[in-house]
Image (tube, rainbow, N blue to C red):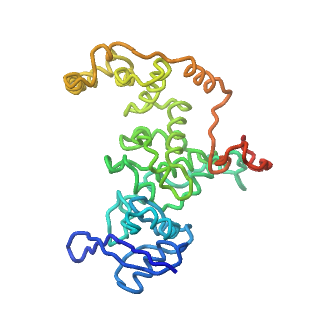
Amino acid sequence: MAEFTLRLRRFDPESEGPAYWESHTVELAPHRSVLEGILQARARFDGSIGIRCSCRAAICGSCGVRVNGEPGLACQTHLDAASAGGRNGVIEVEPMGNMPVIKDLIVDMEAVHWKKIRSVTPWLLAKQPVPEREYVVPRESMVDVTQSMACIQCGACVSDCLAMEVDPLFTGPAALAKAYRFVGDPRDGEHEERLRSLAEDEHGLYTCTHCFKCVDACPKGVDPMGQIMRLRRIAGNDMGIEDRNNGARHEHAFVENIRRNGVLHEADLLPDSYGGKLHPRGLPTLLGSLPVVLKAMRRGKVSLGKILGHPHKASREVKAIFAAVEGRAERYELNLYVSGRDEDASDAPTKPNTTGARP
């Protein structure tokens, strides 16, 4: 047995007072979970401590909190590891972010998380005609959506999403990962309609900023950002959906910018996203950005030469990367949940490939 200090973020809506911190010392074996520590504090010191929990086995997703500022499951976080990562050994536990707090460590999942999940139509819209018995689905197709199916709806990715902090209306990583669950399912008959709706939504598919926070936060390896990128590739590349938010054109301009310059030449990125410097679609946006450009020039952050010129050219190595990727017969989407490799191949023991996926 060892002693651990829990510093809990408390909030009582009935008191009408601000949130505050409260500390409790618990005695548990180091390998026990933060959730058990909280429950012991509630049983011994203050029965009003609020936390949502159920299975205590990292399956139900109910006990999502922030431990030392990082989102995760309280039942999956060991006390010794949390103490080692805390300031002066103190374990700080607070409610998840981007969702309103109901009480103490309990957030309103309905107001944000579940509302966004429902917005992507999280059920199968059967392809017609519906077979008399069952759909026969290729194994590879189900392997592809296995990663998104692993989501336990804990909300950890929503809690840490930087895009949602800036734009609370953003559909969010959990909902978009759920959307891929059905866009990747061959039994669904509304793939294009789903993708067009997400792409045309100004708070939808192209609001994600690739910050990787949701990837790190997810306790089940769902990789929500990876699912969002898959949705974008299918919408923009495979189905040719040009959204009103200019998201697909912006991504294409970004790739072509790197192809030409080897590194990002930002002066070209904005006009190229709208078709070029003189394109009618881009002129209003370029004129609107002039105050920002002039301010940057006055402060020496950019120069006229760099704006009009191209100081960098793509190297042979960069061109070789593009040639290798674009020379593939088909796009290779690695589902890390099923066929990924964490260990180095040279050190890993040789095992037969039973997944059916390519190594």
**Residue farthest to the front?**
88
Q: Is residue 203 shown above or below 174? A: above
| Residue visible at 43% across and 38% down in the picture | 199
Q: Is residue 351 left or right of residue 146?
A: right
Q: Is residue 125 above or below residue 20?
A: above
Whether residue 128 is visible:
no
**Most foreground residue, 182 or 12:** 12
Which residue sits at x=27%, y=18%? 303
Using the image as rendered, state which of residue 117 and residue 18 is in the foreground. 18
Residue 144 drawn at (x, y percent) = 64, 46
Identify the residue at image location x=50%, y=32%. Answer: 236
Image: 229 above or below 320? below
**Residue 152 coordinates in the image, percent (x, y):** 53, 61
Q: How many marks?
A: 0
Query: Split into 4 quadrants, where in the image is the C terminus?
Result: top right
Residue 189 lies, in percent from the top left, at: 58, 45
Q: Residue at x 39, y 15 (%)?
A: 311
Q: Position of residue 183 (x, y in %)?
A: 56, 45
Q: Quadrant of residue 184?
A: top right
The answer to whether residue 171 is left or right of residue 319 is: left
Of residues 349 and 140, which is closer to you in this image? 349
Q: Is residue 241 visible?
A: yes
Horizontal side, residue 110 vs residue 353: left or right: left
Q: Nearer the viewer, residue 83 or 275?
A: 83
Taking the view exactly as shown, the residue that stands out farthest to the bottom is 44
Question: Image quadrant of residue 86?
Answer: bottom left
